[in-house]
Amino acid sequence: MNSNCVSLRSLVDKWLAPTHSMPARVALVGRMFATHGRYVQMEGCTSTGPLTIIFFRHDDGSWCVFPPVPALPAMCGHVFAN
């Protein structure tokens, strides 16, 4: 795993800042259909009102608020070269 890995807990603390009076909760856990990547939907309350954020797990084990870039098909010329 990458040493620069960002944990889900640290992102929830950063974005939702949960407290005992305004806790954050897991609303949904699942996998994306196309890439099979994991995501977690978190809900919390802020001073301005309710907030829902979806966190995506990347291949290096880190969590981000944006989805990972799917692997695109690629051609390998050396496989067909004689």
Image (tube, rainbow, N blue to C red):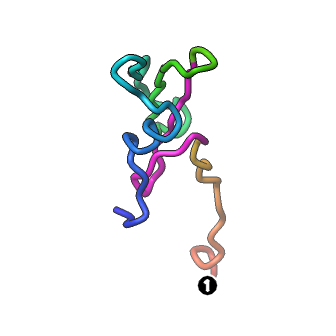
Quadrant position of residue 52: top right
- Residue at the far bottom in the pictured view: 82
Let me know if residue 2 is in the magenta part.
no
Q: What stretch is highlighted in magenta?
A: 51-66
Q: Which quadrant of the rendered structure holds the N terminus?
A: bottom left
Q: What residue type is labelled 1?
A: Asn
- Check the image and report above or below for 58 versus 17: below
Q: Residue at x 57, y 47 (%)?
A: 68
* Picture mark count: 1
Horizontal relation, residue 66 to residue 42: left or right:
right
Where in the figure is residue 76, as x and y percent of width and height?
62, 70
Q: Which of 1 and 45 is in front in this view?
A: 45
What residue appears at the point 43 percent right and 57 percent down from the top-left corner? 60
Residue at position x 43%, y 38% in the image: 13
Counting other residues with Cα less than 10 Å from the Cα at mark 1, is it few (<14), some (14-19), or many (20 or more)? few
Give the camera-side residue of 17 and 2: 17
Q: Which residue is disc 1 drawn over?
A: 82
Residue in view at x 58 percent, y 20 percent = 47
- Give coordinates of residue 49: x percent, y percent: 60, 15
Element on which disc 1 rests = loop
Image vertical order of residue 52 relative to residue 82, above or below:
above
Image position of 46 (left or right of 9) = right
Q: Is residue 65 magenta?
A: yes
